[in-house]
Amino acid sequence: MNGRDWTRASDAEFENMLENALPPVPPDDITREVTPFRKASRRIFLGLGLSMVTLNFWNIDTVQTCAGMVLMLLGLRALRRENGALRAAFALACLRAAILFPLVAAGAYVLPEKAAQSALWDVLSAVNIGLLLAMLLCLRSALRTMRRRAGLPAAAPGTVAVIVWYVLLLVMALASYTGFAVWGMLIAWVFIIRSLLKASRQLDEAGYTAVPAPVRVSDARAVLLLTAALGLCMAVGYAFFVRYPMQWSRLSAPSAQAEPVRDELAQMGFPERVLGDLTDEEVLQ
């Protein structure tokens, strides 16, 4: 301040002082944090990167898939009113989440072997693949529409590559391929995600603006509620549904015919714990 008593200044003078005191353009790091489109698009593409390529050890694949699905839901929720393709992509993501999260929770339950190998699991897997391909096509259409509105070429780098990459991955999975080309697919995936992030950055630099869709539940609360619901379902499964139903009955004393056979099997090194659970008929067989 220059020592002037601003308490006696008019409203116009005070507003003029504030306008002159602030920088004309906010710093880039601040702009990056508050730009709705940049934040939402990064969530979508990073969510794709986490959920479509997973590390299958220490249950990291489950954590990756869930985290990627949540990021995509949050990003698409913010942009769902931007165009019809993004609205359809958000609906498809919700359907995928409705399939994924119950399957994750079911991992904490002991399921009958027939149910685990039934056709229902194959159908759910096929539906999930179809929903993901449809969502990728919607994202490609949405990105082309937004680039045209921003005055950029409609062809977005990476939008076709991600679909081709996923189809090749499905072919390799069906063929049970585990050769050196798998590493090439991983490297290609990194470049594809970088290309998609670059396409969203080009939109932001071209001045494309997006108004986030209004929501009743904040992002942090939505993630907390979803995590709590998933954790509760898994806790119930681990606490009450991790045992197979058994029909126990006390074994009678070995018969005179089976006793020498039991002794002979024990001398041959047959495990006594297993032998003690066998009936006389099983021992004689």
Image (cartoon, grey):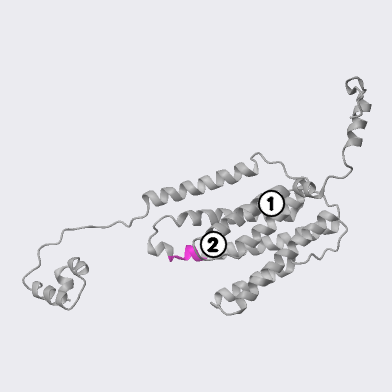
| Label 2, label 1: how far apart the Cα atoms are | 21 Å
Left or right: where does residue 192 sit relative to residue 204?
Answer: left
**Residue, x 17% and y 66% (percent of image)?**
276
Left or right: where does residue 2 sit relative to residue 242?
Answer: right
**Residue with the mark numbered 1:** 75
- The N terminus lies in which quarter of the figure? top right
Viewer can see residue 6 = yes
Count all numbered tags in the image, as a single digit. 2
Mark number for residue 261? none
Give residue 47's quadrant in the image. Answer: bottom right
Q: Which residue occupies the foreground of this view, 23 or 135?
A: 23
Residue 216 against residue 255 in the figure, above or below: above
- The C terminus lies in which quarter of the figure? bottom left
**Residue, x 65% and y 60% (percent of image)?**
48
Amino acid at pointer 2: Asp
Secondary structure at numbered mark 2: helix
- Write the start and end of the magenta stretch as one range: 117-122
Left or right: where does residue 62 sit relative to residue 131?
Answer: left
Q: Which residue occupies the foreground of this view, 266 or 219?
A: 266
Secondary structure at numbered mark 1: helix
Amino acid at pointer 1: Gly
Residue 121 in the magenta stretch? The answer is yes
Could you tell me residue 275's position as x and y percent? Answer: 19, 69
Bin the neighbour count of mark 1 within 10 Å (Cα to Cα): few under 14, some 14-19, many 20 and up: many
Viewer can see residue 82 = no
Left or right: where does residue 262 sit relative to residue 122?
Answer: left
**Residue with the mark numbered 2:** 61
Q: Which residue occupies the foreground of this view, 126 or 175?
A: 175
